[in-house]
Image (cartoon, rainbow, N blue to C red):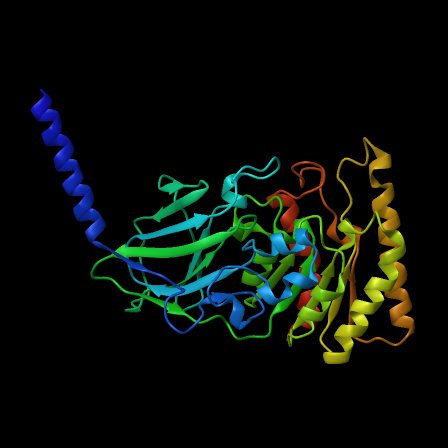
Amino acid sequence: MRHLLLSIIATLGLIFYASAQETKWYDPMEGDKCYVGCRIDHPELHDNYHRLPASMQSQLRSAVWSLSQNSAGLTIRFYCNAPSITVKYELEGSTNMHNMAPMGSSGVDLYSMDKNGRERWCAAPSGLIIRRGESRYSYRDLVYEDGNPEGYLYELYLPLYNTVKWVKLGIPEGYNLRFVEPDNKKPIIVYGTSIAQGASASRPGMAWTSILKRKFNTPVINLGFSGNGRLEAPIVDHICKVDAAVYILDCIPNMCGMLNTIVPRITEAVEKIRRVSSAPIILAEHCGVPFAESSPKSDEAHNKGNKECRKAYEQLKKQGVKGLYYVSKKDIALTRDGSIDGWHPTDIGMMDYVNAYSKVLKKVLK
């Protein structure tokens, strides 16, 4: 019996080894080009999956700098014709959050598009491991219908609330994978809070910023910093370096406890952007809390913050600032079932955000 058991173990080992040998791995960080999209490009970012360059660290509060290393909104594009794709990556942080499942905070998300622009979502229901250290998603039984020898154009969304050390994509020998440089269209830049970063989407592709990216086929740069979106000068200065299609400032949820700063910081941010760009600027209110009917006091601070936001908007309009748009709490209309904890949206709440922003973006994006 002992010999039989050893024989079985040895056979399984050989099978595993052969299988491993048949997989060819691709690293988007190899080579001279950077294949990480949906962030403000900078040479210091070409060997990591952070959102801000290291040279900004001294300008930022430690909390902002730490969050900037989360890969929220970052994507990797590639052509592939393989029937299976394995994504393995290493996470630096914990996958445990009180209001967010590991698939949203620390998972990846894969979409594909054929040559006719038809989009598909890919799932790995029985082939995923999410944990601190090496995680893995295995997408199997993939099919290709349009006859393109390169297969489909894929886009991989990286974790919303974790820091990624490395990523590798594996496909069977005999098939092809080719990384694609980031989309060079003018991006939509979103500077915001935890809701903008992605809390509490079920998976990275369901953050409202990610949904808008697909809906308008336009890169969206996610500069959401959980609990720390306060319209601070270093971040505003950084986004002013980009020739964006639209600038979205959605920071009121993190500024309701600092009411006196809302008007001056919004004014300063808008004025800085206007010095370098005439692109549309969207100001957004706090979405409110869906449990306000049962706990009215819970919304008092948010309503005060929203009044200050409206005040800044009206003052800027009176000063003659053009191309300024507004998304109100009423526009977002967060539903009763749109939140997981009373503060952060579920996927239903994310769609409430998408619907509100889409009404404005349809007007301003050409």
Give me the residue at 88% from left, 52% from top. 259
Report which quarter residue 273 is drawn in: bottom right
Pick the front one: 16 or 307: 16
Q: Position of residue 76 (x, y in %)?
A: 45, 62
> Does 24 sit above or below residue 33?
above
* Left or right placement of residue 313 versus residue 333 in this view: right
Q: Position of residue 306 (x, y in %)?
A: 84, 52
Visible in this render: residue 15?
yes
Q: Position of residue 137 (x, y in %)?
A: 38, 47
* Left or right placement of residue 190 versus residue 73 in this view: right
Residue that extends furthest to the top in the rendered view of this protein: 1
Q: Position of residue 323 (x, y in %)?
A: 78, 74
Visible in this render: residue 286?
no
Quadrant occupied by the C terminus: bottom right
Quadrant occupied by the N terminus: top left
Give me the residue at 55% from left, 71% from top. 41
Pick the front one: 252 or 48: 48
Report which quarter residue 8 is drawn in: top left
* Left or right placement of residue 199 versus residue 110 in this view: right
Give me the residue at 48% from left, 53% from top. 164
